[in-house]
């Protein structure tokens, strides 16, 4: 059976499963809708958090990014896992003890201020929308690559599915579908990685495989002599003029440090992750569930660098200096989708990889022309400064791995279903944050205070539906800055929520004045820095102009420090919070109610 | 129900655990994986340069273990001070 056929079958089955779960897990109360009635088992919650967290970018693009960045790429691995340690020890158990529905609600009550709550609502909505637009786009991209439908049609199919289970099931429906989606995506990620690892090193565990020596079979496939896989890769990289794969990369140490910190703290401050810990039945469960979540995530995140180095070595050895006519079949398959492209700059009929870009700008093909060797003809002007003849998209590293390992067609289809699961699960979690911010934090608490439970549930469904439509719109008409705003989402989460929630829990003296000024100054600084370098003056966005050598991606860590500092100083200069607020904070510390 | 002095002691112990565990959290990732990575890379762990390993694998595995230890410690502490949920 063809790949396309298998893909329709497997994707179809997985969608049927998600819809089935949605019908079974309908939300009947606002408690169901916002926090799944606090009845989610910690292991299930861990899996759901894993799916919620791992987006289309983690699943499809991250390994490729690492593969091209070498050791610098580990900032994503550490940054996107380390935040869970902070969550487990500084936030999750206390917020669970607090026991209400949303992050802005906590901010509002802890800092006894509607204005603080409104600032938090705006941050939550902004962070979630920037994120969700990328997910919807991701759904469209997976559809167009694997199922040969138009990207926009893909976005609309994705919207319809999410609409169905988010609007019907709220948090309850989302949680159980995320559990299923985690299973799909983790199998889809591990299976090809395990087979490639066996093929190259005879070690079935990819995490160990990339630190092993090449097997007989691996040597034959790559046409090279034996030795450790990573030192082989370092050697080849150096021969081609790249930096050693395992050594220091292009970024400065301080920038790697700052980006890692911003990603970690940003993770711990993202509302769609924090609210997952509101759903467990107990505080004990909330703690445990952070551990399960990180385990579920770490399984993929420790496999990713293995996939990255296998693919990098394989790419160089099977493509570099090979004539196009004998290129591996995956190369020709993915050339059709524009993820790889070749232009014979030196006219020798062979494909050469080298430092620098092959082309100037985004690769585009002539629709009909065929080159002398049967290759697709690139219309983008070539970059004469580099001898590099190949354009290789980051995403190819994961997408082509089943074909590289010569796995059957259904595995390729499974990878498509995995990418969709990753994108849909993250989108759903984000949409819920938006829906609850609108229906609970704005409508119920500020505008129509005496609404009944039934009315609120209807608003929540409408808000979720509305959010799906807005997200879909951005998926179809992506704002030009989607890639840039990821830095924004993390920077804002790091510089707004994290400091005031941590201080709110651990420091009774933190007061309304401190928190509001802290949040505003953290956000203002971070936003100003990112907007200046990313939008107003992008040509100045080079290391020489950055403060302390910290890029806009890492500036959230400084924004966080500013927020901490301002909150502490201002709180000390203004009156202490009211006694009942201090009592509430005291109470958060102990799992049982203390009289 | 616990005495207020006990409650303060419970909170102090909790903070001590968190500080120690986060010190490890910092050392394996920012320390071994970034600041000292170049030096550690001279040591090999099988085919892995050690700094590279901490950044790519070690930190992530140790993070999971840190949470496991934290959960165990806190659950015991809750019991010891009789503040666990019933």
Image: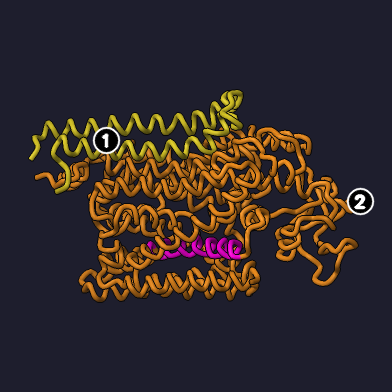
Chain colours: A orange, B yellow
Local packing at callout 2 (Cα closer than 10 Å; few below 14, some 14-19, many 20+) is few
Q: Is residue A22 above or below residue A329?
A: below
Same chain shared by disc 1 and disc 2:
no
Q: Is residue A74 above or below residue A472?
A: above
Label 1: chain letter:
B
Q: Position of residue A49 (x, y in %)?
A: 39, 54
* Quadrant including the C terminus of chain A: top left
Residue located beneath label 2 in the image: A348
Q: Quadrant of residue A228?
A: top right
Residue located beneath label 1 in the image: B73
Q: Quadrant of residue B10?
A: top left
What element does badge 2 sit on? loop
Left or right position of A214 against A203: right
Report the magenta residues as a range. A410-433
Does the segment drawn in magenta span residue A412? Answer: yes
Q: Is residue A182 above or below residue A549?
A: below
Q: CA distance from mark 1 to mark 2?
A: 65 Å
Q: Nearer the viewer, residue A81 or B35?
A: A81
Label 2: chain letter:
A
Residue at left 77%, top 37%? A241
Does the segment drawn in magenta span residue A526? Answer: no
């Amino acid at each position: 059976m063809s790949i396309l056929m298998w893909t329709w079958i497997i994707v179809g089955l997985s969608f049927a499963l998600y819809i089935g779960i949605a019908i079974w897990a309908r939300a009947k109360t606002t408690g169901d809708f916002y926090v799944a009635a606090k009845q989610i088992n910690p292991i299930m919650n861990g899996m759901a958090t894993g799916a919620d967290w791992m987006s289309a970018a983690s699943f499809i693009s991250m390994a490729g990014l690492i593969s091209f960045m070498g050791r610098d790429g580990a900032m994503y691995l550490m940054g996107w896992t380390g935040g869970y340690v902070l969550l487990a020890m500084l936030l999750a158990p206390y917020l669970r003890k607090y026991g209400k529905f949303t992050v802005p609600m906590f901010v509002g009550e802890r800092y006894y201020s509607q204005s603080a709550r409104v600032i938090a609502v705006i941050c939550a909505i902004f962070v979630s929308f920037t994120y969700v637009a990328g997910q919807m786009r991701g759904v469209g991209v997976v559809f167009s690559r694997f199922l040969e439908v138009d990207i926009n049609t893909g976005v609309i199919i994705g919207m319809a599915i999410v609409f169905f289970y988010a609007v019907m099931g709220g948090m309850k429906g989302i949680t159980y579908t995320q559990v299923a989606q985690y299973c799909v995506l983790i199998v889809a990620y591990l299976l090809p990685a395990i087979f490639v690892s066996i093929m190259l090193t005879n070690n079935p565990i990819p995490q160990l495989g990339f630190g092993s020596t090449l097997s007989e079979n691996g040597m034959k496939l790559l046409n090279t002599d034996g030795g450790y896989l990573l030192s082989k890769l370092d050697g080849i990289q150096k021969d081609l003029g790249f930096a050693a794969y395992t050594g220091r990369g292009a970024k400065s140490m301080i920038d790697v440090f700052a980006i890692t910190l911003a990603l970690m703290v940003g993770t711990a401050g993202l509302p769609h992750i924090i609210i997952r810990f509101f759903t467990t039945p107990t505080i004990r469960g909330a703690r445990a569930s952070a551990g399960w979540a990180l385990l579920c995530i770490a399984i993929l995140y420790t496999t990713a660098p293995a996939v990255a180095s296998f693919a990098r070595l394989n790419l160089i050895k099977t493509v570099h200096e090979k004539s196009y006519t004998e290129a591996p079949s995956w190369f020709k398959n993915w050339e059709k989708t524009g993820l790889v492209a070749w232009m014979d700059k030196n006219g020798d009929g062979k494909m050469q990889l080298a430092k620098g870009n092959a082309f100037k700008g985004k690769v585009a093909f002539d629709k009909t022309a065929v080159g002398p060797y049967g290759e697709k003809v690139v219309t983008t002007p070539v970059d004469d400064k580099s001898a590099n003849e190949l354009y290789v998209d980051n995403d190819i590293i994961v997408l082509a791995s089943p074909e590289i390992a010569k796995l059957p067609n259904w595995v390729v289809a499974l990878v498509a279903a995995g990418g969709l699961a990753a994108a849909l699960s993250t989108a759903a979690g984000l949409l819920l944050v938006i829906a609850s911010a609108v229906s609970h934090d704005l409508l119920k608490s500020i505008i129509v205070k005496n609404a009944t439970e039934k009315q609120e549930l209807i608003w929540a469904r409408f808000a979720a539906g509305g959010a799906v439509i807005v997200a879909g719109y951005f998926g179809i008409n992506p704002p030009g800055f989607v890639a840039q705003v990821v830095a924004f989402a993390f920077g804002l989460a790091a510089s707004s929520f994290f400091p005031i929630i941590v201080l709110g829990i651990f420091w009774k003296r933190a007061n309304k004045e401190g928190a509001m000024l802290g949040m505003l100054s953290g956000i203002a600084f971070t936003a100003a820095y990112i907007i200046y370098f990313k939008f107003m003056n992008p040509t100045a966005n080079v290391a020489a102009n950055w403060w302390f050598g910290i890029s806009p991606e890492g500036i959230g860590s400084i924004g966080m420090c500013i927020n901490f500092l301002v909150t502490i100083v201002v709180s000390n200069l203004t009156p202490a919070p009211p006694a009942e607020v201090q009592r509430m904070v005291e109470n958060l510390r102990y799992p049982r109610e203390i009289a | 129900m616990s005495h207020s002095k006990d409650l303060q002691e419970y909170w102090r112990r909790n903070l001590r655990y968190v500080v120690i565990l986060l010190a490890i959290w910092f050392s394996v990732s920012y320390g071994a994986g970034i600041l000292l990575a170049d030096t550690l890379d001279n040591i090999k762990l099988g085919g892995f340069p050690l700094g590279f390993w901490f950044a790519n694998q070690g930190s992530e595995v140790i993070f999971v273990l840190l949470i496991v230890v934290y959960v165990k410690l806190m659950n015991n502490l809750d019991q010891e001070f009789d503040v666990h949920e019933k």
